[in-house]
Image: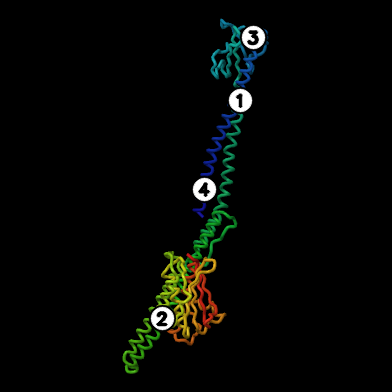
Amino acid sequence: MGEHASVRLRTTALAVLVMAVALVTAAFALLLLVRGSLRGGIATAAEDRAAALAAQITTSGLPAPAVDDEDDEFEYDDVVWQVRDAAGTVVRSSQSLPAPLPVTEADQVRISDSDHLYVVTTEDAGPYTVIVAASLEEVGDSTGALATPLLIGVPLVLLVAGGITWLVVGRALAPVERIRREVEEITGERLDRRVPEPASRDEIHRLAQTMNRMLGRLQESRDRQQQFVGDASHELRSPLSSIRQAAEVSRLHPGALPEGELAGAVLEESARMERLVEQLLLLTRTGGAAARPEQDVDLDDLALAEVRRVRRSGRKVDSAGVGAGRVRGDQTALAQVVRNLTDNAARHARSTVRIAVRSTEDGGAVELVVEDDGDGIPAGQRERVFERFVRLDEARDRDAGGSGLGLAIVREIVTGHQGTVTITESALGGACFTVRLPAS
């Protein structure tokens, strides 16, 4: 929880910092905007007043003199003006002023201790000069009145935003913390556990899904390893027992076994163990996640190679149905598929094995068909034969009947190539294995 709180605190602090910079910038910009708007309004009013006085002097002469109440304390009007002649003498003014208005066009001038004026001078009044000055006191007052609530409001907004950010970040990190606690409890013996997936369809939801898929792959890998160990120990027990039994008989009864029979038994059983180990390793590799090298593979070439091999053993093989068929995949693995199916057919056939390779009508797949004229496989047992160490004829000798791994290897390799393998009844009377793979 400490790390969770630290992330939460850092995120909140960063959000508050960014918001503070944004709010201060916005407040400063607002003050400048308000100040500029007020100042622009005053400047426009002063310019309009100067133009009106100049027009009045030009058309009807000088305005009437101003009359001041001497009993009142002097105050500037919002807009004051003076008219001067060519000698610079003030001939008219809006009110008696303690000092003459400056003739310069400076934006701000000070003519007393407290007043700032915006001055406009125009010479469009014939021999006279019109000077209009507008007080800028309203600009300062309005800007100051706006600055006060901003100084109070910005910290309050930051405080509220920080609290909201703290709560939102906490709620956003809560699923991450639940995922972390669950992952912490997962061990090599508890790979069946999964992290909780939040209901929200966001990045955390996708993260949880990805982790669960990863845990599924780890569990699958662990299960394959355990299955390999169990399969190996189960199947190796029989040849090892045969070797030990022959050795014990030879030691206890030296003359009971014919000469060379112990060595033959050891060689025979060790060869069986070697084949079994090779098949187990192959099955483990085909079920692994490692990427296979992909290339264009001529399935008909692999089938014809097996036809020649089986014919050398004296078995009759019908290869008339072998046609062109190219797929994409691992050539070594696909050769193992063809060999295992051919060996299975040759082992159960009475006299004939038939092999065919053909493309489907739409050209999207290639089929490998291997048939025999044996006893066939009952419909209810056709899925079981793809399980490991399944032999339907338990009375058959183990060597003649195989290890029970060949068809399991076929299923694993074909599935890894996005293909399917099915069993039907052959026209020859036995089993018909059909492998369908995507065409290259």
Looking at the image, is 267 positioned above or below residue 158?
A: below
Report the Cα–Cα distance between label 1 and label 2.
106 Å
Q: Which residue type does callout 1 highlight?
A: Leu
Point out which mark residue 9 bears.
4
Mark closer to the observer (3, 1): 3
Report the Cα–Cα distance between label 4 and label 1.
43 Å
Structural crowding at the residue carrying mark 1, measured as other residues with C-alpha within 10 Å and reported as few (<14), some (14–19) or many (≥20) = some
Report the Cα–Cα distance between label 4 and label 3.
73 Å
Looking at the image, is 80 positioned above or below residue 89?
A: below
Mark closer to the observer (1, 2): 2
Q: Which residue type does callout 4 highlight?
A: Leu
Point out which mark residue 58 bears.
3
User: Residue 255's spot in the image, x, y percent?
Assistant: 32, 94
Q: Which residue type does callout 3 highlight?
A: Thr
Report the Cα–Cα distance between label 4 and label 2.
77 Å
Mark closer to the observer (4, 1): 1
Q: Earlier in the sequence, mark 3 or mark 1?
A: 1
Mark closer to the observer (4, 2): 2
Tell me which corner region of the image, top left, top right, bottom left or bottom right, holds residue 403.
bottom left
Q: Looking at the image, which is closer to me, 322 or 183?
A: 322
Q: Earlier in the sequence, mark 1 or mark 2?
A: 1
Contact? badges 2 and 3 (CB < 8 Å): no
Looking at the image, is 1 positioned above or below residue 123?
A: below
Report the Cα–Cα distance between label 2 and label 3.
128 Å
Report the Cα–Cα distance between label 3 and label 1.
31 Å
Structural crowding at the residue carrying mark 2, measured as other residues with C-alpha within 10 Å and reported as few (<14), some (14–19) or many (≥20) = few
Check disc 1 and report its element: helix, strand or loop.
Answer: helix
Picture residue at 60% right of the left edge, 15% below the top: 132
Tell me which corner region of the image, top left, top right, bottom left or bottom right, holds residue 197.
bottom right
Point out which mark residue 38 bears.
1
For the question of whether residue 234 can be seen, the reply is no
User: Residue under circle 2?
Assistant: 311
